[in-house]
Image (cartoon, grey):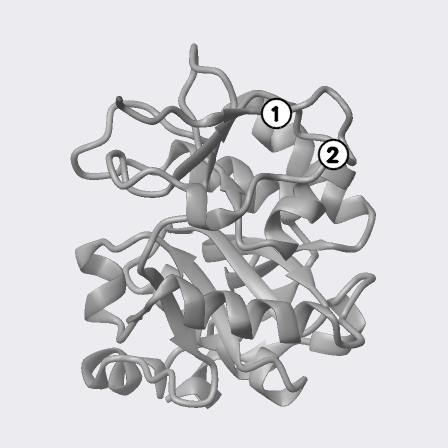
Amino acid sequence: MPRHPALLDTDPLAPFPPVEQALRDPDGLLAVGGDLSPPRLLNAYAHGIFPWFSRGQPILWWSPDPRMTFDTASFRLPSRLRRDLRRSEWTVRADTAFDAVVSACAQAPRPGQDGTWIVPAMRRAYGDLHRLGHAHSVEVWEADALAGGIYGVAIGRMFFGESMFSARSGGSKVALAALAGFLHEQGCPLIDAQVENPHLLSLGARHLPRPAFMAQVQALVAQPGLEGGWTARFGTRPAAVLA
């Protein structure tokens, strides 16, 4: 008989089913329903699970195998972009325009996708997490305009990337590089990039089998973390230093 994803309990603190029960087709679909409250979201991420659904669908929860990840210690920008950055006047900050970054990610065109999974309910949910000190943005600025950005969720010493955008060529890559550098400084070795796509692979993302990914997540989320705003801790950084 075909398997079906689990139906979540209405209690936001109820446990998720084990990730080993996720479907193979579609890859990683684990559960349906529930809500996007901060307790539910933090519980999900801490167990290697994330929400991903489109307008008109119920909330869908995923834990694909393998998982796409970045090692913060080894992330490098493409050589051509590094050359361009040497004369760039872009600057990079954190948590100074979270809602604007999420909005820009929601509006960014995605090849092969019609619409966005960053629906209004998701924007509100991650805004709540941001105000609680768990969701963060890294922004690339060209004077007073956003050139790119990335946002995601931090628990303990683990960062779960959600989405990024470019308003200028290379903006999202610079945001990702700045995030990786900051996380490496703070003792956070891994960025979750969720599911494979050509853009992530071109930037050096690697596959981690789900058991290996889960082992790292369980160890990292249990460590003292980076809760609270990142603005002062991150500072204002010239993008040129990433070259």
Q: Give the residue displayed 38% in from the left and 60% down from the top.
A: 172
Mark sitting earlier along the chain (1/2): 1
The residue that disc 2 covers is: 14
Q: In the rendered image of this protein, does residue 42 appear above or below residue 66?
A: above
User: The C terminus is located in which quarter?
Assistant: bottom left
Residue 75 vertical placement versus 35 (above, below): below
Quadrant (top left, top right, bottom left, bottom right) of the N terminus: top left
Whole-percent x, y for residue 167 in the image: 37, 50
Q: Disc 1 versus disc 2: distance between alpha carbons? A: 8 Å
Report which quarter residue 55 is drawn in: top left
Observer-nearest of 94 and 131? 131
Where does the image place residue 208, in percent across and percent down from the top left? 34, 70
Where disc 2 sits, the SS reads loop
**Quick check: 112 above or below 69?**
above
- Say which residue appears at 22% left-offset and 54% top-offset: 197
Name the amino acid, label 1: Leu
